[in-house]
Amino acid sequence: MVNRIKDAQVATGKTIRVAGHDELKQRGVIVVAGDHRRIAVFADGDSVYAVENNCPHMGFPLDRGTVRDGMLTCHWHQARFDLRSGCTFDLWADDVPRYDCWIENGVVLVAAESLVPADEAYHRKRLRRGIEQNVGLVQAKSLLALLEGGASLDRITSEVVDYAQRNLNNYSEGMIRLGCMINLFPLVSSDTAYLGLYYSVRQIAQEASNSVPRRDRQALHGKTHDHTTLKRWLVQWVQTRHRDGAERTLLTGIEQLDNDQIADLVFCGASERLYADGGHLLESCNKAFELLELLGKDCARSVFPLLVPSMVEARGREESTDWHHPIEIVEPLRSLEQDLNETLEQGKTKQWAGDPDLLGVILGDDPLAIIHQLKESLGSGATPEILAQTVAYAAAMRLARFATSNEVTDWFNPQHTFIFTNGTYQAVRRSATADVVRAIFQGAIAIYNDRYLNVPAASLPSERQPPANLPEDGGELQKLLLDTLDQRGSIELSADIVSRYLQLELPFENLVDTLVFATVREDLDFHSLQVLDAGVRQCAAWGPGEQRQNIMVGVIRNLAAHCPTRRAGQQTSQIAQRLHRGDKVFEED
């Protein structure tokens, strides 16, 4: 008979007396209270083992399971665990924490603390394993542990990005989600940050599980490649859809150019085709630069190649009918590009007095007048940043004025346009060269093409009588907004609530936190989060006032049009929270 079984690493803290060894063998399992969790202590022959009593998958009491040949089977979902290590044979279930357990003088003893380490390195490794295995619960519990343990956003993000760049073949939806959450992270509560990061990570894991890993290319040898030549080459590779050439050129630019030149190179490639990939390409490039701001330039060599497949494969609006007929728009845009450098130089010598008619022209029904007015403004001293900001605001107004008589799928058009125009605004702030500034005109034409979606134009909250019973307390308004988004068809009431909140000049970050939570709890694609991210960025540019109210009205109307969903992702995240805290998940009937 074995009278002492003990791990090599013996717990040095509190020890709990379980029972006599013979009693445990007779009963099979005894549950005791540890310092933080209930512990199931099992006898299997003469051996004794101890694990946390909650199944790591859904919290079913493991003492109700079956032990055979050192293997514990949970009866709820048939997950099986090795009692020696706590490791699961069914990867979707997660490993169960185990405890030091041994026999002394015929008495079974167990350590009150788990052998599972609680340090950041362990949970980062666990997060990566959850992504590799595409197990949402493991991802969620790891993120919770990292955030509660004080892990910084850049360290969590670097773990996710390192896996993504090795296992994805393009700059995916999950990467866009992650980029949005990086921007919004400073404005949200810890619970919302957790839910938002999980919303991003689970998408990356799903994409990676279905993706062929990217094949590495290398930069061109030597250090003699100048900015102008690399830019000319990249345009050629984009035009001829040559991925290898484009990627090697881009990698060379990352090694040899400064930050402004890299931005010019990348955004030139993104805007070579008109409104490429429905506006997605330029925003993906923008998100890659935002990632660099968090993680540093060293990650550019691994992240930026993910942009290249879309850059060379994207379709441009010059390849579609609607930018040629009934009005030829492509030719005037291409003609504009020829003298845009000269126009920018002219503007540098002048002081722009502003143009009260500019917004109306951009929202008008004459595409040639839009191109002309924007060019005139540039030549008259308007900065590319100011023009890009104005165009982005016009795009937000398309969402704020969206007619609900349209089909729900029609929201995608103004979504894409607003996301693109905000991306353009961020791009020209990084590099205001002619090859980046031309994207302002592309965004303005996309706004023109969305004009029919504002017929009849929806009224803004400021143009109609608001509900008389809206509260004035910020917390009550936030709760009312979430309750309203639980009801389908709550578009205008949601807009009234947000407008009231902003009119009262209540804390903007609290409203953002509520909107981020309301977005990431839904089973929505990335567009709604992109719209919110773009809206917050544009609100920061405009500051408090009418523009901020109208931008956020557009954001909330777009979100309300797609709520509620099943919220399966939120269900998983909540289960993970309860398991992490040791709350009961399984309940008796």
Image (cartoon, rainbow, N blue to C red):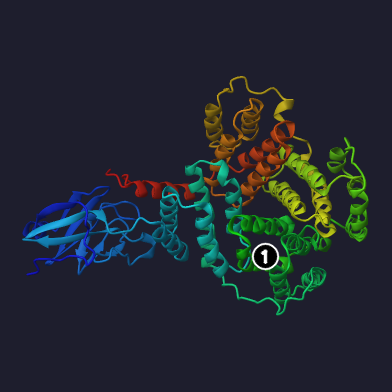
- Name the side, left or right, on which 132 lies relative to 453: left
Residue identified by numbered label 1: 307
Name the residue at 66% across, 23% down.
Answer: 466
3 left or right of 414 in image: left
Amino acid type of the residue tagged 1 in the rendering: Leu
For the point 47% across and 47% down, the residue is 570
Above or below, 444 against 506 in this view is: below
Q: Is residue 567 visible?
A: no
Assign the N terminus to one quadrant of the image: bottom left
Is 114 left or right of 476, judged from the image as shown?
A: left
Pinpoint residue 571: horizontal percent, then vertical percent.
Answer: 44, 47
Image coordinates of residue 434 in percent, x first then y, are 85, 57
Residue drawn where x is 21% and y is 57% of the image: 12
Q: Is residue 328 visible?
A: yes
User: In x, y percent, where is residue 37?
Assistant: 27, 49
List the single residue furthest toward the top.
Answer: 468
